[in-house]
Amino acid sequence: MIKVAIVEDNQILRKSMEQLFEQTEDIVCVASIKNLLNVVSTFQKAQPDIVLMDIGLPDISGIEGVRTLKNNFDNMQILMFTVFEDDDKIFEAIREGASGYLLKKTRPQEIIDAIRDLHQGGSPMSPLVARKVVHYFQSGSPLKEEDFQLTTREKEILFALVDGLSYKKIADKYYLSVHTIRKHISSIYEKLHVHSKSQAVAKILNSQKHK
């Protein structure tokens, strides 16, 4: 079972998410809260694998919540769930450690799929968010080989990951095996000194921010 916690101040939406997870065989909601005031103690008891979290929360924002949770729970994955589509909110959430970013207009089945994807090591993003991240790379300072010693192929695969492509789709796109794609991704993570896709994206975003 995938243990999920919800942080959402809109009661109607929060309850609808609870009902959605109750109807899903492999997902269980272990906590559902409206703000982040006692989040550390609450989650120490609930021990969720994944947190579905709004950004526009009262008292403490979801961005600050990401920072707090990452400082207290090493393995907890955070999936932002918000109406915000502006670049600053997206990139700030990723830099602080969010592993995925969904817009609230995402369909229920896509939310379920995103949680499963995240639990299996993916980094789900709504298509609009993925496009914004890719556009950020393309319109900002180009990623140079000397930045992280990435090869041309590794950069192509990194951007394909950011664009939301699965390992299988990347393999098909470049006429390579999934095994080869995994080897390239392992090399990318080693060169960036990270352990996941979200950390790789955050690393690149921070490097571009300081150019």
Image (cartoon, rainbow, N blue to C red):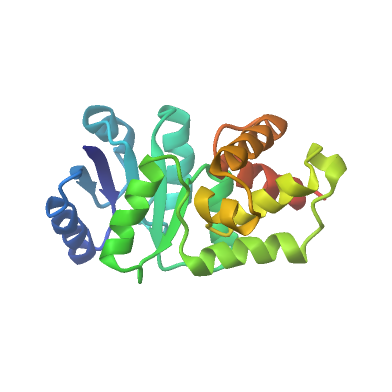
Q: Seen in the image, is 142 located left or right of residue 100? A: right
**Residue at figure coordinates x 59%, y 67% from the top left:** 131
Q: Residue furthest right?
A: 146
Q: Nearer the viewer, residue 116 or 88?
A: 116
User: How far across and how far down the image is residue 179, in percent?
Assistant: 56, 38
Quarter of the image where the N terminus is located = top left
**Residue at figure coordinates x 52%, y 69% from the top left:** 128
Q: Seen in the image, is 174 located left or right of residue 96? A: right
User: How far across and how far down the image is residue 21, in percent?
Assistant: 18, 52
**Residue at figure coordinates x 66%, y 50% from the top left:** 157
Res 36 → quadrant: top left
Compared with 53, 199 (above or below) is: above
Q: Nearer the viewer, residue 126 or 85?
A: 126
Q: Can the viewer see residue 61?
A: no
Q: Seen in the image, is 123 located left or right of residue 107? A: right
User: How far across and how far down the image is residue 134, in percent?
Assistant: 65, 62
* Count of marks placed on residues: 0
Q: Can the viewer see residue 158?
A: yes
**Residue at figure coordinates x 58%, y 51% from the top left:** 171
Q: Nearer the viewer, residue 149 or 135?
A: 149
Compared with 39, 127 (above or below) is: below
